[in-house]
Image (cartoon, rainbow, N blue to C red):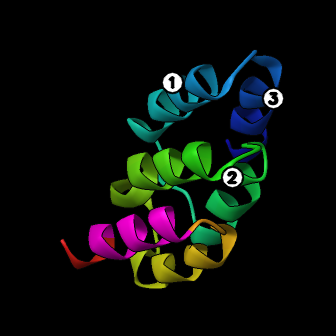
Amino acid sequence: DFLKLRKKMAAVANDEEMLTEAKKYFKQKCFTVIQMKNLSALFLNDTGKYNFFDAGYLFASDVENYSSLQTELKDDYYINRFKAMLRN
């Protein structure tokens, strides 16, 4: 399932379409934090990565490790939003 999603995400034209593909899969499957991290590499900026992490939060099979994804974000604005998301 991970490889199918990665292939579909890589085949589309922009971040919004990648996020749409991911959300379709999230309705059916859960993914590990490591898989989420690998998929987030497809996004070229923090906006896309944060939106992906936000959409995937409820679908992580090991949500207790989700905070480790913060290291994928570089912009303080998105780091703070990510921290706030984890608190809620």
What is the CA distance from the residue labelled 3 to the residue labelled 1?
Answer: 12 Å
Question: Does residue 57 belong to the magenta stretch?
Answer: no
Quadrant of residue 71 within the rendered picture: bottom right
Identity of the residue drawn at 49% across and 55% down: 53
Q: Which residue is mark 1?
A: 20
Does 58 appear above or below 10?
A: below
Q: Which residues are magenta?
A: 76-85
Where is residue 5 drawn, in percent x and y?
69, 35
Q: Which residue is mark 3?
A: 10
Does 25 appear above or below 87?
A: above
Looking at the picture, which amino acid does disc 1 mark? Thr
Looking at the picture, which amino acid does disc 2 mark? Ser
Question: Which residue is at the far left?
Answer: 88
Q: Residues within 10 Å of mark 3 (few under 14, many from 20)?
A: some
Where is residue 14 drawn, in percent x and y?
70, 21
Where is residue 1 drawn, in percent x and y?
67, 41
Identity of the residue drawn at 40% across and 73% down: 80
Q: Secondary structure at mark 3?
A: helix
Q: Which residue is mark 2?
A: 40
Identity of the residue drawn at 57% across and 82% down: 68
Q: Residues within 10 Å of mark 1 (few under 14, many from 20)?
A: some
Quadrant of residue 88 within the rendered picture: bottom left
